[in-house]
Image: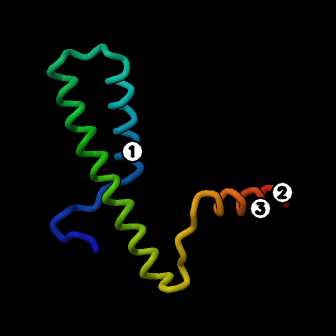
């Protein structure tokens, strides 16, 4: 269930910003204080994205009801391979 106090995020925009932060941190060119601030921002973005994905999953589960079954990755891979062969 979504938390009414938490604003919805633009997932794609947040993921793009997170990727940019990771690239900056991996480059190692930032001063320590800037690196720490970027790391903190990255952690917040990561948590927000995870929360948004969980919210989306809950919405899908609510829409699909009992029809939605959890699929393990191997089952999904087999289904994708069968579709790719068509």
Which residue shows up at 40% across the image and 75% down it? 59
Q: Residues within 10 Å of mark 2 (few under 14, many from 20)?
A: few
Q: Where is residue 70 in the image (x, y as percent from the top left)?
A: 53, 71
Q: Are marks 2 and 3 in contact (CB under 8 Å)?
A: yes
Q: Nearer the viewer, residue 67 or 42?
A: 67
- Residue sticking out furthest to the right: 86
Rendering colour mode? rainbow
Q: Which of marks 1 and 2 is nearer the N terminus?
A: 1
Q: Residues within 10 Å of mark 3 (few under 14, many from 20)?
A: few
Q: Name the residue under label 1.
A: 15
Q: Name the residue under label 2.
A: 85
Is 19 on the left or on the right of 34, as rendered? Answer: right
- Residue sticking out furthest to the bottom: 66
Q: Which mark is residue 83?
A: 3
Q: Which of marks 1 and 2 is in front?
A: 2
Q: Is residue 81 above or below residue 16?
A: below
Q: Which of marks 1 and 3 is nearer the N terminus?
A: 1
Q: Nearer the viewer, mark 1 or mark 3?
A: 3
Q: Is residue 45 above or below residue 56?
A: above
Is 5 on the left or on the right of 21, as rendered? Answer: left
Give the quarter of the image for residue 22. Answer: top left
Q: Where is residue 74 in the image (x, y as percent from the top left)?
A: 64, 58
Q: Which mark is residue 33?
A: none
SS category of the residue bearing label 3: helix
Which residue shows up at 67% across the image and 56% down it? 77
Which residue shows up at 25% across the image and 41% down it? 43
Q: Quadrant of the C terminus?
A: bottom right
Give the quarter of the image for residue 51. Answer: bottom left
Work out how far the residue at label 2 is from the one at label 3, CA to CA, in angstroms.
5 Å
SS category of the residue bearing label 2: helix
């Amino acid at each position: 269930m979504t938390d009414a106090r938490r604003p919805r995020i633009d997932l794609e925009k947040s993921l793009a910003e997170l990727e940019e932060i990771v690239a900056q941190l991996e480059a190692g060119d930032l001063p320590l204080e800037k690196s720490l601030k970027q790391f903190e921002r990255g952690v917040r973005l990561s948590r927000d994205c995870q929360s948004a994905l969980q919210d989306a999953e809950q919405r899908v589960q609510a829409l699909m009801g009992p029809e939605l079954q959890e699929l393990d990755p191997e089952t999904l891979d087999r289904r994708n391979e069968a579709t790719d062969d068509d």
